[in-house]
Image (cartoon, rainbow, N blue to C red):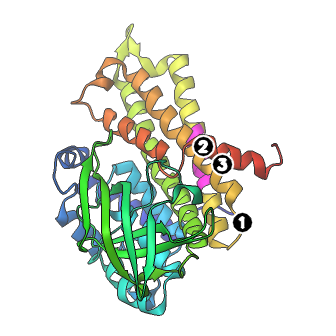
Amino acid sequence: MDLALTEAQEMLKNSAREFLERECPPSLVRAMEDDERGYPTHLWEQMAGLGWMGLAFPQEHGGEGGSLTDLAVLLEEMGRAMLPGPFFGTVVNVGLTILDAGSDFQIQQYIPRLASGALIGTAAMLEENAQYSQDGINMSGELSGDSLQLSGSKLFVESANTADLMLVPVRTSGSGEHGVTIALIPGTASGVSMSALESIARDRQYEVSFNSVSVPTEEILGGVGEGWPVLKRSLDRATALHCAVSVGGAQKVLEMTVEYTKQRVQFGRPIASFQSVQHDCADMVNAIDSARLATYQAIARLEDGLSADREIAMAKVLANHAYKWTTLTAQQLHGGIAFMEEYDLQMWTRRAKVAELKFGTSGPHREVFAQSMGLV
């Protein structure tokens, strides 16, 4: 399996890095942590103008016709820059899920607007148990004539304050894999309310409550009670692609640390000349390269339509380790300055912790990997 980037992907990577270094410096990310909206609209419009929202959507639906690997290359650069905003939720969680399982009506209605950046989406998946599994979906949905009535709440919904469309899985019957139904709900629908939650990354996360929200049956994705296979594929894609975000963040932290150790002088010489510091940096490189390789391998299998549970689990475990290990080691090598609010490194450190929790912690993914290898 050749996982090397193509010439076009290298161009995408370089152009994205140049754009984000210019338009999304750490100073902007810092400012957006205190901004009510959470991201600048002008940056969203610029990204839309570059075709980034439509990168992975077919050309016949207003996209660029790119692949999941193309999208991963872009997301790695976004992770490197800590890009604020609803890109991941709009494109990955909502857009690709509708493209995968939507009716012709749903695809025609939503995909062109998602691809152009005119429509912002988010997924409201997690509940009190915070499980990314079929057993974690317990919010009630009841069929009544030609509509679905929703009541309950979802937690940790990203960018719900600006979302035009929410993808909401509920339970309409049964238990486990059976009876999960996915609804597409306007963010401004009657009966929808939200309250802000605190996040260590200071991104925009909300508890969203649904009080007898009525959803027409044509806005059900994948059929009544048949939503879990759709959601499973959506989570697989999102998990693998979010690993690319983590890899990008870890890569930037490594670069910052190497540069700092070359400048920081102790005992009359740069600390980069100390063997223990060199070993730490080499370990960071190994961790990041391993995570990147596993991530692109998992994405390649998804693109080929192959089973990728083992590869996704391995990628998530390695990406969690790489981002966490890199930021913690960077904190140690920087010394006290790394813990100062005024210094940028702490922003990546906080985001590494949030990334570790998204789409499941390492423990459940280790179990999936062990099962796939016949170890348990």
Between marks 1 and 3, how big is the CA–CA gap?
Answer: 13 Å
Q: Is residue 332 above or below residue 222?
A: above
Give the residue type that dot 3 points to. Met
Tag 3: Cα neighbours inside 10 Å, few (<14), some, or many (≥20)? many
Pick the residue in front: 143 or 97. Answer: 143
Q: Is residue 299 magenta?
A: no
In the rendered image, which residue does mark 2 sit on? 318
Give the residue type that dot 2 points to. Leu
Give the residue type that dot 1 points to. Ser
Among numbered discs 1 and 3, the one appearing first in the sequence:
1
**Which residue appears farthest toward the front when viewing the image?**
144
Residue located 83% across and 48% down the image:
374
Residue 359: image location, x then y, percent: 51, 52
In this view of the protein, can residue 196 be seen by the observer? yes
Stretch in magenta: 287-295
In the rendered image, which residue does mark 1 sit on? 307
Q: Secondary structure at mark 3?
A: helix
Disc 2 and disc 3 in contact, CB within 8 angstroms: yes
Pick the residue in front: 192 or 374. Answer: 192
